[in-house]
Image (spheres, coloured by chain):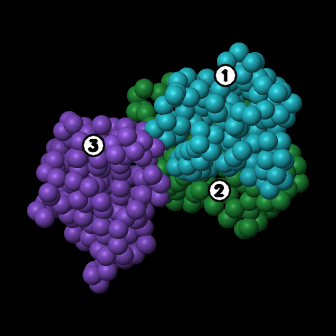
Amino acid sequence: MADPALDNLIIAAVAEVLETMFFTEILQVGGSHPSLPALGARVAFTGHNSGIVSIRISEAAARSLTASFLGESEESLSQTQVANLVCELANMLCGCIVSKMAAHGCFTLDSPELIDGSTQESTERPEIRQSFAIERGSLTVSLNE
Amino acid sequence: MKELVIGVGDGGVSRDADAMLITYALGSCVALMVHDPVARIAGMVHYMLPESPQSQPERDARPFKFADTAIPLLLRAALAQGADRNRLKVFAAGGAQIMNDNSIFNVGKRNCLALRKALWKFGLVAHAEDIGGTTVRTVRMEVGSGRVWLQSPAGERWELNARRKPVAASTEESSWR
Amino acid sequence: MALNILIVDDSPVMRTFLRKVVQLTGLAVGQFSEAGDGEAALNLLRERWMDLVLTDINMPRMNGEEFVRQLGLDNMLRDIPVIVVSTDASHDRIDRMIKLGARGYISKPFQPETLRDEVERILGVCNG
């Protein structure tokens, strides 16, 4: 089910999160899913409406984002920090997307959980999915309502 | 007042309190300026692009041309001259969106993001900035006072004011008097 | 006087980020403490004095809303300034947190200087 409004909302959320907290931007909207190795995380939300936001991101891109976020060099980062960052990125994107969906509704976000980044498809078919080319790789954001 | 001109893709630090650092016609380029009000040291860089090329010789030849090499270099130079990181006031100008003949990339915006990224690596953010938009800017910094002045091609001048008083600077001022 | 600051967030990378933002202020920080949820934060607060608390909302065990409510019920802790830093930007939530006693609210994503200014505003008021 294609909904251009929701698509644009995801694009706006990704742009906002990348620019304000990671000092980088979307290089291109669309494109392929993250190639392996990749990491994934998802956050469930309940409230005005309920659902799951999940992300998949190439490992190199995740590492580069972690370095920008923490202001550290990539070599000094641990795998745990990169995994933490992917969870936090999912959390921020989910928060940003649901606030844009309903500014007045109150949502509760579950804690983010890591998912297998190598599987391309989740079992449920996502209603909305958008991929982005970003520095050092790609990012896919899915929204299941 | 003596004028020390910083060229395009160049940078420098001065301790001459009677001098003024100046760089002309920033379009999508960004000028980053730092000032230590106690040591009275000022530094300025005029970089052109967000990222340095992979090739080492190219990067080494023009380190002030790229944000990711220019900003650390300027900060290290200022500290080497005796500036204190905690007293450092940081200013930025430029990064305008300039309509190039066929460029679809907004170099100005990318230069501004690269600025924030490189400063954050040093645990810094700009105290004041005049970035983006479509104006071409000429910028001057007085080495002695650290005051920053901008000028448009039409000759209009305005001062770049810190949105906030740095905590460290305000306490120093009061104990000074 | 150096200030003790408590950062409450279940994400370790976010705690590091917040610590870095506080360091932007140029305020003298005596000790940074960190907790991964509200319950751990309350335990820390009962052990040592804190001058400022930054807290997330969505956390396991005890969330930020319950944590701030508990602070308000404790005579020893109710005056410690709290800034909420959360992905939740809904007006309802912000209203509720402010009513519970939070002094500031920053929604993620935010630019580092936004939180820096908020910390300075709130500590300025407290010290002034």
Q: Are marks 3 and 2 in contact (CB under 8 Å)?
A: no
Q: Which of the chains bears the disc numbered 3?
A: B
Q: Residue furthest top?
A: C47
Q: Is residue A26 left or right of residue B138?
A: right
Q: Which residue is mark 2?
A: A13
Q: Which residue is nearer to you in this view: A13 or C27?
A: C27
Q: How far is the residue under mark 2 from the one under mark 1?
A: 38 Å
Q: Residue furthest bottom?
A: B154
Q: On the image, which quarter does residue C56 sit in?
A: top right
Write down which chain is painted cyan. Answer: C
Write down which chain is painted purple. Answer: B
Q: Is residue B151 left or right of residue B10?
A: right
Q: Which residue is mark 3?
A: B38
Q: Which residue is mark 1?
A: C49
Three-letter residue code for mark 2: Ala
- Colour that chain A carries in the picture: green
